[in-house]
Amino acid sequence: MIYPARLHTRLRSTTPEGQQDEIVQTYRAMVALRDNGTWSLRYTDTENHGQTALQGAPQWMSISRDGDTRSRLLFRVGERLESVYVSPMGEFQMHTHTTLFNATVEAEQGRVELHYELFLSDSLAAQNELEVWWERQT
């Protein structure tokens, strides 16, 4: 099943020094639900001049961004996974370590909660909490 949706994201980020930031955004997205339990969302990220895709299954989630900045991040609870991050300033070595992943995906709506540590060049850069939720648009 494929349908248009209103997508909301909230990213809370805390640096090792304790500085906090929160970004809340809303997008128009396309949602695809598959019989095997996987799902995907795709939307245009105007700030990055490209597309962002979120894909998930019961045990993992990925985020792919194309545009001025390109990145590929994979999240599985308890695993530290290598990621790709290329900005106009160059490519960076990046890893994620996921501590929480919950996804409730239904026919008309969904909610994802993801907590992870982000490492740049093997140093902790931030502890992030990402919430994503959507509802079908008619």
Image (spheres, rainbow, N blue to C red):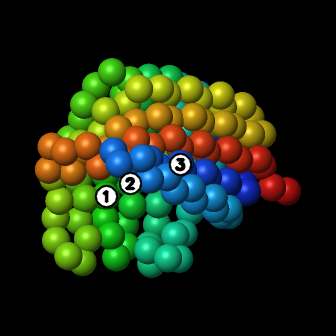
| Spatial CA span between label 1 and label 2 | 6 Å
Q: Residue at x 21, y 51 (%)?
A: 120
Is residue 20 or residue 34 the one in the foreground? Answer: 20
Check if mark 1's residue and mark 2's residue have beta carbons within 8 Å. Answer: yes
Q: Any mark on residue 71, and which?
A: 1
Check if mark 2's residue and mark 3's residue have beta carbons within 8 Å. Answer: no
Q: Left or right: where does residue 121 sit relative to residue 47?
A: left
User: As shown in the figure, which amino acid type bears the numbered disc 3?
Assistant: Arg
User: In which quadrant will I find the C terminus?
Assistant: bottom right
Per the image, label 1 sits on a secondary structure element best described as strand
- Pinpoint residue 69: horizontal percent, then vertical percent: 33, 70
- Pinpoint residue 108: horizontal percent, then vertical percent: 78, 39
Q: Earlier in the sequence, mark 2 or mark 3?
A: 3
Q: Any mark on residue 13, and which?
A: none
| Spatial CA span between label 2 and label 3 | 19 Å
Q: What number of labels is visible?
A: 3
Q: Residue at x 44, y 74 (%)?
A: 48
Q: Callout 3 environment at 10 Å: few (<14), some (14 to 19), or many (20+)? A: some
User: As shown in the figure, which amino acid type bears the numbered disc 2?
Assistant: Ser
Of circles 3 and 1, the one toward us is 3
Query: Height in image: 65 above or below 77?
Result: below
Is residue 118 or residue 43 the one in the foreground? Answer: 118
- Pinpoint residue 118: horizontal percent, then vertical percent: 31, 44
Residue at the spot of label 2: 64
User: As shown in the figure, which amino acid type bears the numbered disc 1?
Assistant: Ser
Q: Earlier in the sequence, mark 1 or mark 2?
A: 2
| Spatial CA span between label 3 and label 1 | 19 Å
Residue at the spot of label 3: 12
Q: Left or right: where does residue 46 sit relative to residue 138?
A: left
- Pinpoint residue 102: horizontal percent, then vertical percent: 56, 26
